[in-house]
Amino acid sequence: MILRFKNIICKKRTYHKNKVNVKVIVGLGNPGEQHRRNRHNIGFIICEEILKKLGNPKIKLKFNGEISKTNYKNKEILIVKPLTYMNESGKCIKEIVSNHSVSLDNLLVIHDDLDLDFIRIKFKRGGGSAGHKGVASIIEKLKDDNFCRLRFGIGRPPEGIDPVEYVLEDFTEKEFKLIKENKENIVKAILDYMEFDIKYVMSKYN
């Protein structure tokens, strides 16, 4: 769509909504061993479990991220861990979406969520960032919020603990054990998204 204003031509940005054969699964987090088990890194943790399930496809460093290309149910899948640090996640995602002609229906971002009880998962399409800096960066870079998300509940911090500090703390041993015990169900939900669509998984898992 082209909008003309006097002598200025402005092209409305679109993200190839007609192309549907590539699905991108993005796990948000911060790179570095010191952040590996942080609550904020649940996106990375889940992506690592997906990669194990799919036979550990080769990882390439590209577009400021770790990218693994594989196939699932005859669909091309990219599994991505941005390496830009959380607040700049959008840089990586914008490059991937643009270079691989990804429909936003086929972009799933996995991130931690303070407003959900611990270990609850909820699929969502579109909407604001709810204060999540990684999601906000993606919205800002894409100039669009109509992508899919998987919110992973980490719960609210105890009274007196700053939420910023809380998300950068490691999961407790009890929490991490529960994540491991539930990893099959979490991964299955994402595989269902890969095979079907956001409406299907919202209906099944929310």
Image: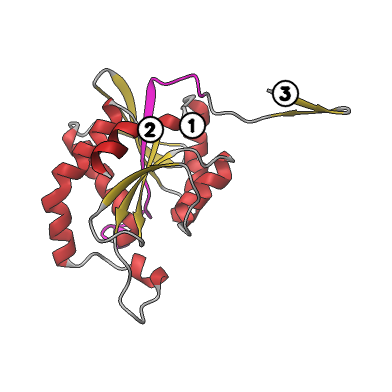
Q: Name the residue under label 3.
A: 2
For residue 69, which numbered disc appears in the image?
A: none
> Which secondary structure lies at badge 1?
helix
Query: What's the CA distance linking mark 1 and mark 3?
Result: 21 Å
Q: Do the residues labelled 2 and 1 touch (CB within 8 Å)?
A: yes
For residue 24, which numbered disc appears in the image?
A: 2
Q: Earlier in the sequence, mark 2 or mark 1?
A: 2
Residue 35 falls inside the magenta stretch: yes
Q: In x, y percent, where is residue 181?
A: 11, 52
Looking at the picture, which amino acid does disc 2 mark?
Answer: Val
Q: Name the residue under label 1.
A: 97
| Rendered image coloring scheme | secondary structure
- Region rendered in magenta: 17-37
Which of discs 1 and 3 lies nearer the camera? The answer is: 3
Q: In which quarter of the image is the N terminus?
A: top right
> Which secondary structure lies at badge 3?
strand
Query: What's the CA distance linking mark 2 and mark 1?
Result: 8 Å
Q: In x, y percent, where is residue 138?
A: 50, 45
